[in-house]
């Protein structure tokens, strides 16, 4: 078994880049995927979020681009944030000047992207919509794209990018290496992968439907009227960076504003923000300029902030799989974290679906707040129907029924 990256037969310059990034020991998904990728095999890979999938495809792609100076690579991601994160990580790995990169995402000015493409990049990272836009304009050519990565493919298909992916791949040579990576691989995704992959090597590391064992989960049963007060109570006992998930764009702005009124440093992130604003919000959160980020599910994928200690599901997600991605924002790279979920009587069906996904061998979630067997650290508590009161001495103002009206 490979215990460090030198065992893969990678170019020495690439090994130096990895050492500079403090990549010493491959993660399980990297240890399994990199050898097959270096052999040129197509890959259908899955692993829990935060386990190093970018390195699993990025390291062999860069090695291949170094070996084949005429070739280029394309990486597709579902969100702008994930694309930017992937590009930034891959750029750190690149040890030679002839592998230029381009980031092609919506929300950014076209002239900037035209300049990147005019420089003849060999590693292109982007979202399906903007990639298709450039293909239609003729500003992007993929005739030399010998390596293709579909990252977070389940999310791309959930977002309706299936037809766009088909269009993009029609511009790519049929003789190519394709790697499909995803945090979850439901049967529909496995079936669709047959369109994109040739005799792929199936790689799975850990359970993709279970929470990481180093995430302590807690369920809070409450009512819509008491939710705001309970949130203040939780935040009053929470240290470190927090991400709060809500279901609507308007809800993020409203909740962030209310938290600011209660003396919490908070900001909001959702899909309607301009890309420049989204970048500033994420960077501010990374730099710990504020403690709380209130976000829609757009931040559940591709937001890699190592210091997130707590994830709060203020609203449960519509899609059960998104619950796993949300709570995966904490406990990154082996660290520990906590996930707290608010459950109201109206959330019974949503929670039942989440529970069923994460506990397929159990008949049903018999009651709200069921402590999941696959996570012995999870627990449940129930708050009564009186407004929660907290003194000002521990950092939170008094919560009442009108605090978040």
Image: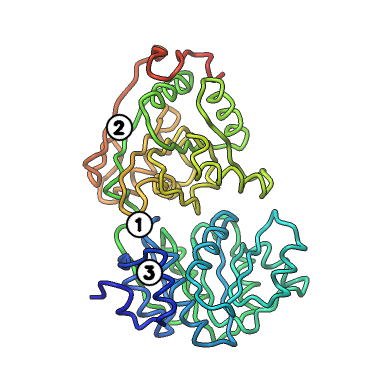
**Up-down relation of residue 138 to residue 344 (above or below):** below
Q: Secondary structure at mark 3?
A: helix
Instruction: Choose mark 3 or mark 2, whichever is in front.
Output: 3
- At 30% from the left and 45% from the top, the residue drawn is 336
- Which of the two discs, 3 and 1, sits closer to the camera? 3
In the rendered view, tell whether residue 337 sits above or below residue 153: above
Tags 1 and 2 touching, CB below 8 Å: no
Q: Residue at x 66, y 64 (%)?
A: 104
**Which residue in the protein does label 2 denote?**
367
Q: Residues within 10 Å of mark 3 (few under 14, many from 20)?
A: some
Label for residue 208? Answer: 1
Q: Where does the image place residue 89, in percent across and percent down from the top left?
A: 49, 63
* Discs 3, 1 touching: Cβ within 8 Å: no
The answer to which of marks 3 and 2 sits earlier in the sequence is 3
The foreground one among 80 and 321 is: 80
Nearest the camera: 348 or 119?
Answer: 119
Image quadrant containing the C terminus: top right
Spatial separation of the CA atoms under disc 1 and disc 2: 24 Å
């Amino acid at each position: 078994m490979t215990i460090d990256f030198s065992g893969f037969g990678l170019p020495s310059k690439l090994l130096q880049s990895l050492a500079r990034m403090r990549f010493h020991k491959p993660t399980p998904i990297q240890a399994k995927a990199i050898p097959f990728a270096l052999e040129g095999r197509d890959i259908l890979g899955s692993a829990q979020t935060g386990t190093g999938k970018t390195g699993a495809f990025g390291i062999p792609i860069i090695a291949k681009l170094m070996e084949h100076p005429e070739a280029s690579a394309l990486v597709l991601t579902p969100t702008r944030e994930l694309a930017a994160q992937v590009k930034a990580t891959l750029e750190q790995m690149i040890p030679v000047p002839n592998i230029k990169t381009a980031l092609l995402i919506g929300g950014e000015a076209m002239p900037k992207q035209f300049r990147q493409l005019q420089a003849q990049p060999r590693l292109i990272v982007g979202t399906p919509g903007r990639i298709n836009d450039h293909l239609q304009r003729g500003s992007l050519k993929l005739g030399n794209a010998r390596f293709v990565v579909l990252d977070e493919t389940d999310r791309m298909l959930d977002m309706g990018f299936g037809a766009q992916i088909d269009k993009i791949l029609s511009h790519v040579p049929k003789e190519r290496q394709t790697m499909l990576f995803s945090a979850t691989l439901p049967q529909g995704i496995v079936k669709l992968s047959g369109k994109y992959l040739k005799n792929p090597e199936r790689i799975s590391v850990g359970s993709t439907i279970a929470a990481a064992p180093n995430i302590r989960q807690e369920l809070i049963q409450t009512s819509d009227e008491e939710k705001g007060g309970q949130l203040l109570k939780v935040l009053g006992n929470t240290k470190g960076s927090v991400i709060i998930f809500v279901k609507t764009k308007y809800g993020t702005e409203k909740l962030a504003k209310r938290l600011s009124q209660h003396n919490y440093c908070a900001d909001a992130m959702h899909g309607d923000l301009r890309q420049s604003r989204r970048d500033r919000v994420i960077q501010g959160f990374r730099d710990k300029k504020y403690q709380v980020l209130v976000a829609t599910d757009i931040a559940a994928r591709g937001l890699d902030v190592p210091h997130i200690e707590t994830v709060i599901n203020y609203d449960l997600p519509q899609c059960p799989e998104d619950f796993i991605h949300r709570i995966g924002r904490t406990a990154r790279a082996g660290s520990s974290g906590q996930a707290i979920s608010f459950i109201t009587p109206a959330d019974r069906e949503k929670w039942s679906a989440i529970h069923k996904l994460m506990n397929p061998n159990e008949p049903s979630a018999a009651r709200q707040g069921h402590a999941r067997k696959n996570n012995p650290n999870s627990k449940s508590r129930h708050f009564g129907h009186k407004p929660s009161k907290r003194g000002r001495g521990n950092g939170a103002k008094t919560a009442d029924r009108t605090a978040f009206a």
